[in-house]
Image (tube, rainbow, N blue to C red):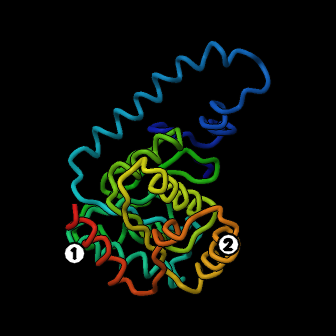
């Protein structure tokens, strides 16, 4: 059955509309009525911030786990996600994901099964509907930038499983915010040396070699296959606060 979430609203069957709220906000082509409607959208954006801050204010120490929505349950990175969720909870963290399927579902599942707090921050997309069943606290956002603010504000570190464009976007945004000192630096750990080694090699041989980044920027990334190491880095960062 066709379904889509628009913030807290669910649409099904022939009520599903085309496009997304972000798309309509950012698209200035076509009729000029956007000049008159955009100021009112500020109130909706404000409401999303208020809802997010209110729901997560008492979350406590948390780590965000990113990864592909396309990760199948029989793939090794799904099992890693479940194990990471469990180990983070056992180390005293809540677990935050994008709330979707795949690697996000895996981390939420591990956290929930371990008796910890499993958080999902969903987003309106044309091809996904709702939060996965392992989310204990869930918020559906209309606007990506509001959702991204919640990821950064309430996480003390990021663990990144194999993923695609969305995962890369979230990872590089976190690195950019740390590089520009918009946020206090926090650990970013990439799980899967085989998966991420090509990207790291390109960053070093091309981007660093061309002086587009510094060595310190690369030092912000830790690539490992050791889940214990990943969680230990999160614990060390928490204890250093």
Q: Secondary structure at mark 1?
A: helix
Q: Please state which of the two labelled residues, at mark 2 or mark 1, is closer to the viewer.
A: 2
Q: Is residue 58 left or right of residue 12?
A: left
Residue bearing the label numbered 1: 90
Which residue appears at 50% of the width and 59% of the height?
175
Give the answer, above or below, for where 190 lies relative to 146: below
In the rendered image, the residue lying farthest to the top is: 36
Image location (x, y in percent) of residue 185: 38, 59
| Snapshot quadrant of residue 50 | top left
- 10 Å neighbourhood of mark 1: few (<14), some, or many (≥20)? some
Give the answer, above or below, for where 52 lies relative to 77: above
The span from disc 2 to disc 1 (Cα, nearest Å) is: 41 Å
Image location (x, y in percent) of residue 19: 68, 39
- 10 Å neighbourhood of mark 2: few (<14), some, or many (≥20)? few
Q: Secondary structure at mark 2?
A: loop
Residue 209: numbered disc:
2
């Amino acid at each position: 059955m066709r379904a889509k979430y628009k913030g807290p609203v669910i649409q099904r069957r022939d009520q599903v509309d085309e496009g997304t709220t972000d798309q309509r906000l950012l698209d200035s082509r076509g009729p000029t009525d956007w000049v008159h409607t955009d100021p009112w959208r500020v109130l909706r954006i404000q409401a999303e911030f208020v809802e997010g801050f209110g729901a997560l204010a008492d979350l406590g120490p948390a780590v965000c786990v990113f990864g592909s929505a396309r990760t199948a349950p029989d793939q090794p990175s799904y099992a890693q996600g479940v194990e990471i969720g469990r180990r983070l909870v056992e180390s005293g963290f809540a677990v935050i994901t994008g709330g979707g399927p795949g690697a996000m579902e895996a981390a939420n599942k591990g956290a929930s099964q371990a008796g910890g707090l499993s958080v999902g921050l969903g987003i309106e997309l044309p091809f996904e509907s709702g939060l996965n069943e392992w989310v204990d606290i869930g918020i559906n956002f209309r606007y990506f930038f509001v959702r991204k603010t919640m990821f950064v504000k309430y996480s003390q570190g990021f663990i990144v499983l194999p993923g695609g464009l969305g995962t890369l976007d979230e990872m590089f945004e976190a690195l950019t915010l740390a590089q520009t000192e918009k946020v206090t630096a926090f650990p970013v750990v990439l799980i899967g040396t085989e998966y991420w080694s090509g990207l790291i090699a390109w960053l070093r041989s091309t981007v660093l070699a061309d002086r587009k980044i510094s060595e310190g920027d690369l030092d912000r990334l830790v690539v490992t296959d050791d889940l214990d190491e990943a969680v230990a880095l999160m614990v060390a960062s928490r204890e250093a606060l």
